[in-house]
Image (cartoon, rainbow, N blue to C red):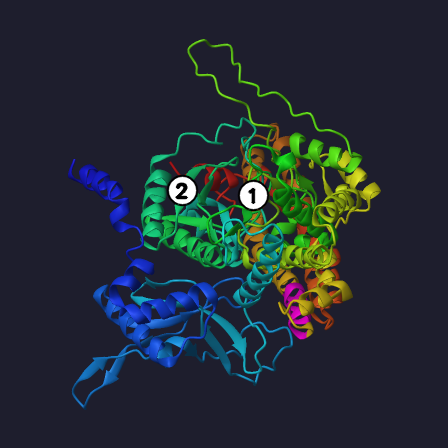
Amino acid sequence: MLTLNHEVKSMCNVPEIFGTLVFNDAIMRAKLPKEIYRSLKKTREDGSPLDIHVANSVANAMKNWALEHGATHYTHWFQPMTGITAEKHDSFITPLDDSKVIMEFSGKELIKGEPDASSFPSGGLRATFEARGYTAWDPTSNAFIKDGSLCIPTAFCSYGGEALDKKTPLLRSMDVIDKQAMRILKLFGNPTGAKHVLTTVGAEQEYFLIDKALYHQRKDLLYTGRTLIGARPPKGQELEDHYFGVIKPRVSAYMKELDQELWKLGILSKTKHNEAAPGQHEMAPLFTTSNVATDHNQLIMEVMKRVAANHNLACLLHEKPFAGVNGSGKHNNWSIATDTGVNLLEPGESPRDNAQFLLFLVAIIKAVDEHQDLLRLSAASAGNDHRLGSYEAPPAIISIFLGDELTDILQCIEDCSIYKAKETSYMEVGVDGLPRFTKDATDRNRTSPFAFTGNKFEFRMLGSSASIACTNFMLNTAIGDVLYEFANELEQAADFKAALKDLVRRTIKNHKRIIFNGNNYSEEWVQEAQKRGLLNLPSVADAAPCYISSQNIALFKKHGVLSEMETRSRYEITLENYFKQIHIEALTMIDMVKRDIIPAVNAYIKDLSQAALAKKQLNMNLNCQLEETLLENLSDLSYGLFQNCKTLEENVETAAKITNVKDAANAYRNAVFSQMEATRSIADTLEGMMGDKYWPYPSYGKLLFSVK
């Protein structure tokens, strides 16, 4: 009872614990002198320069606050192009004399750090021997305490100033869309008096939970994050009984602790539920600005794994940890709003009469159509290749879902016809006691990669382990570029209203091919998309070259989001990450087959042979056809497995010698990965023929259904 009461009490104090580990605006206001607080706030809101006097005062307040919460170290927390976060910890200790120390933290230490940059991916931006890199404080994202250290969110760049991280281009892209969207708002008179336009994101996060002890018995999960071998269990997700089902006690306890840890970090964890596959779950936060949402999502993934260990669980964030059931995605809910709180994607009561909304809407349609390749590229990873187009996620084809009402409105604008709004209808479920409520104007489409969902767009193609920074800087830049074009045209127009009407109509006509409200999972859509001239880039090897198209290099350079060198480096890194991941997976599979599976099969063959001999010795007339048939099949399959594994080794050896990243990526996709699939097929067949006593790894059934 005491435990229950304590749990209930702790869960009832959400307002008390929320943000307690964050150096947020309320703490700043309380801890900083008024003039320092005003100066810092101006920097956070307007990008005004921060002088060293202000930085020193902020650093001292941060340090004192961190010490109050038991922190002894600080770290510049950054997001290199590994896809995860990085941190180097320094203590606050400063010697006073040979026997005493004091705790100090200066403005210089707050503003700039110098981590070794030599071992991070750079895509040729720097040589390995060039070690110096800089981290620069991002004052727009709050510092926080984690594991006894004050974590200061920062950007990461090379000695030459090139961006070596995922945050810097995101911050640059936010400036682009701010500047261009404000030009558009001024054309409409800027009725709310906005000074800035912000992009906001809420990133839903899917994940799997499995028993930690079983996790440690699987080499493939330990080394690669996914199962490379595994026969399907008799039951998967066919009955749809896991989706939104009752949350199991052990999982519920995990989710409760996860919520509390995230709330302490100021993360607005809102929704939790079971997902479609056994062992799969989801959490969704409320939206916040894009760069803060990116920081938060990185923290969410880290905290998910750490909290899982407290419950003897392992949290899997790979896009496809198990074959035969749904993989995990990350839905990037993107919108655009003013600093006065007006959502620019809110259609209002009458979308057809909301000219400002329609202009922003068609700008997004044009941007997504013209830059399909960038959106597809932003979701490209070796893990996500397993998931896209598998009737569980959108195909590798970009399209936009608008719903019937908006699609009809745009069609009427294009045709210069009168839109007749549908009458408000009510839900009728045939039960008198249930309340009546109005139906939404359109249904939702869960198969669309880029769906309008009321006042935001939901990009559903992103993989579960990915950083959301790449998607959002590409989306911001593409839309910002279209707003730049629109503003240039409309600012020069003699008749704004006439020019606006013509621009909206022309944009709809030229880019409506990207709008599709049907079933994106169907083969018919793949064929229709080809007719429309839409891109279909099924793998990373297909998508990555889009980085270095002349159009995309020019786009990023034009708006100062990425230089040509920075863009080319990301092309190199994307392909390197792709084939390195497959290389690790192939070596892991070879190790599993040679060291575990073949010896296990041989042990079973030996026992079967001895059983058959024992039968013969007991009675020559006893039927041994079962043992003989099994022995024959096992011998043939094990030899086939051996031969396929040998071919896989040869293919890996050949691919590893290729120095050109594009050629290497194609070799790993076409020769190595395809051979892994052939090898797995035999291994999975063997697993289905052998008992648990012999098979060296926990089965899918145990992995997916053991957590109660």
Q: Choose between 433 and 48: the one closer to the eye.
A: 48
| Residue type for callout 2 | Lys
Q: Dividing the image into 4 quarters, which one contains the C terminus?
A: top left
In this rendering, position of residue 500 left or right of residue 461: right
Across and down, in percent, residue 609 comes to 58, 42
Whether residue 235 is visible to the viewer of this picture, yes or no, is yes
**Residue furthest out toward the front:** 494
Across and down, in percent, residue 62 comes to 29, 69
Across and down, in percent, residue 673 comes to 69, 55
Q: Dividing the image into 4 quarters, which one contains the N terminus?
A: top left
> Which quarter of the figure has residue 554?
bottom right
Whether the magenta-drawn stretch holds residue 567 is answered as: yes
Numbered tag placed on residue 569 in the rendering:
none
Q: Choose between 384 and 138: the one closer to the eye.
A: 138
Q: Residues within 10 Å of mark 1 (few under 14, many from 20)?
A: many
Q: Which callout, 1 or 2, points at the residue further toward the start of the chain?
A: 2
> Which quarter of the figure has residue 566?
bottom right
- Dominant SS in magenta: helix
In this rendering, position of residue 462 left or right of residue 27: right
Q: Choose between 650 and 48: the one closer to the eye.
A: 48
The stretch of residues the image draws in magenta is 565-576
x 44%, y 49%: residue: 315
In this rendering, position of residue 358 left or right of residue 301: right
The residue indicated by pointer 2 is: 270
x 78%, y 47%: residue: 534
Across and down, in percent, residue 704 comes to 48, 39
Q: Is residue 461 above or below residue 442?
A: below
The residue indicated by pointer 1 is: 456
x 37%, y 55%: residue: 306
| Residue type for callout 1 | Lys
Q: Is residue 58 above or below residue 420?
A: below
